[in-house]
Image (cartoon, rainbow, N blue to C red):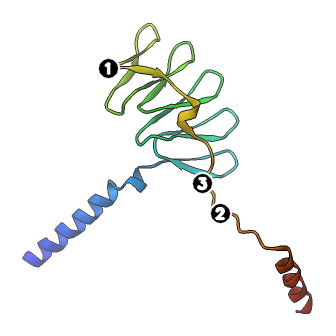
Amino acid sequence: MFQNMKAILLITFTCGSMLFSPALLAACKTDAFGVKQCGEGRCKIDSSGHVHCSMFTKGGAAVNSVGKVFCGKGRCLKDKSGEVFCATSVKDDIMINVLGKARCDKKCDVGKVEYCKTEPDLPPVIEIPAEDEQAQGRQILKR
C-alpha cells in the first residue's frame, strides 16, 4: 500500500512541477506566415501579422489603435484614446476606468516597442560552402 502511495506522490509531484516549468509558461503565437514565436511574457500580433512578445517574464503586450504592439513589465491595456499603458510590475494591476483612462494600483507607464521581442525563434541557418555544393551536384549526376 505504501509503495502505491509513493508512486502516486512521485507522479503528482513530477506532473505538478512540469505544469509550472518556465518553458511551459512562455507565451506563444503563430504569425500570419506560419512562424511560431514564444516570448518571456504575453504575445500579440500586429496589424501586419507579425508577432511581438514582451521581453519580461510575465510581462504584458497590447495593440494600440493603429495596430502597433507595445509591451511592458506588467499587464498592458489599451485606453479609450487607443494608447497602450502597462503596469510597471507583474505584481501591480491595471484597469481602464469609467472615463476610459488607464489606472494602476501603484504606477502605470506608457507601453514601449523596445520592451517587445520581435524576431522569430528560427533554427540557425547552416550554410554549405560553394565547393561542397559542386561536389554534391557531381554525386547526384553520377547516380
In the image, residue 78 sits, relative to residue 113, either above or below, namely above
Q: Residue at the location (63% across, 34% down)? A: 46
Q: Check residue 124 in the rendering and tell me which mark sits there, or answer none.
A: 2
On the image, the x and y values in percent for residue 113 come to: 58, 31
Q: CA distance from mark 1 to mark 2?
A: 43 Å
Q: Residue at the location (70% across, 64% down)? A: 125
In the image, residue 63 sits, relative to residue 125, either above or below, namely above
User: 72 or 28, which lies in front?
Assistant: 72
N-terminal of the pair, mark 3 or mark 1, is 1
Q: Check residue 69 in the rendering and tell me which mark sits there, or answer none.
A: none
Q: Toward which corner of the image does residue 95 lie, by quadrant?
A: top left
Q: Residue at the location (90% across, 86% down)? A: 138
User: Are the residues tagged 3 and 2 within 8 Å (C-beta)?
Assistant: no
> Furthest residue to the top?
99
N-terminal of the pair, mark 1 or mark 2, is 1
Q: Toward which corner of the image does residue 116 lie, by quadrant?
A: top right
In the image, residue 130 sits, relative to residue 118, either above or below, namely below
User: 54 or 6, which lies in front?
Assistant: 54
On the image, numbered disc 1 is attached to which residue?
105
On the image, numbered disc 3 is attached to which residue?
121
Q: Toward which corner of the image does residue 57 lie, by quadrant?
A: top left
